Amino acid sequence: MTKFDFCEFPVLETERLILRQLVPEDTISVYRIRSDYRVTHYNTGAPYRRVEQALRLIHSIQDGYEEQKELRWGLVLRGDDHTVVGMCGYNYWNRHDRRASVGYDLAHAYWGQGLMPEALRAVVEFGFHAMDLNRIEADCTVENSASARVLEKLGFQPEGLQREQYFEEGRFWDLRLFALLRRDYHPT
Ligand SMILES: CC(C)(COP(=O)(O)OP(=O)(O)OC[C@H]1O[C@@H](n2cnc3c(N)ncnc32)[C@H](O)[C@@H]1OP(=O)(O)O)[C@@H](O)C(=O)NCCC(=O)NCCS
């Protein structure tokens, strides 16, 4: 695999999905995902109430890419390039330590079909090879068992708990930390 240098946005393909760059035309799809409380519940930030918030997110992801700080994909099902059903990717990338962190979310209608593990497998593979990462990090709230399951399926190891890490909806939330090291990565 050629080393990734941000020159050309990397499109990734899996059995059922294409992972591609998010564009302003995806605003409505992104809004549908991020305005759904079932999806946003375990993340920081309230569900979107205005479509412009989705456009702002897409612009911020594009800026992060231009600045070579972030690499986040929009997920579309093969055969329907116009509907983004989820998002995933690297929220930061520390070049010196060869470490990056993944985040993801999926439209509620598509939960439970193994789509996010499938997308993340491609993202992790890209991370260890094209980005030459040594460590991929992730976190989720203690209550977010679906997200923890996804990480377990990928072979991420639990690394502990950040107690009362953030305040949202009138309470503190504990975060579970996970990581996958290159030497523990065994693609299936
Ligand atoms: C976490 C998430 C991406 C999982 O994606 P997915 O493609 O549904 O993943 P899977 O199909 O592998 O399912 C993972 C687990 O979700 C749970 N799950 C499946 N369908 C579900 C549903 N309809 N409702 C609630 N939980 C469900 C199951 O525990 C499942 O584990 P299992 O396969 O051992 O039964 C998705 O639930 C989501 O977008 N959640 C909201 C956003 C979020 O939490 N993002 C991560 C922040 S850290």
Image (cartoon, rainbow, N blue to C red):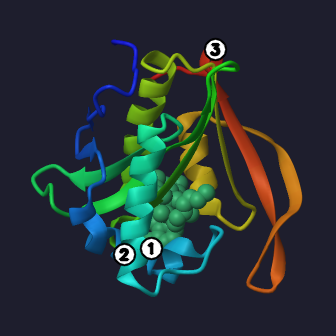
Rendering quarter of residue 72? top left
Residue 47 placed where, x, y %? 52, 80
Q: Is residue 56 left or right of residue 179?
A: left
User: Which residue is label 1 attached to?
Assistant: 34
- Whether pointer 1 and pointer 2 mark residues with C-beta atoms closer than 8 Å, the reply is yes
User: Which residue is depicted at the point 51% across and 78% down?
Assistant: 38
> How much space separates mark 1 and mark 3, taking CA atoms?
35 Å
Q: Is residue 28 left or right of residue 147?
A: left
- In which quadrant will I find the C terminus? top left
Query: Which secondary structure lies at badge 3?
Result: helix
Residue sitting farthest toward the right? 163
Q: Residues within 10 Å of mark 2 (few under 14, many from 20)?
A: many
63 left or right, relative to 11? right
For mark 3, what is the residue? 183
Query: Could you tell me residue 134's position as x and y percent?
Result: 63, 19
Q: Residue at x 62, y 74 (%)?
A: 45
Q: Residue at x 51, y 20 (%)?
A: 128
Residue at image mark 2: 31
Whether residues under marks 2 and 3 lie with C-beta atoms below 8 angstroms apart, the answer is no
Amino acid, disc 1: Arg
The spot of residue 112 in percent (x, y) is: 41, 62
- Residue 108 in view (yes/no): no
Label 2 is placed on what type of residue? Tyr
Could you say where residue 30 lies in the image, as x and y percent from the top left? Answer: 35, 68
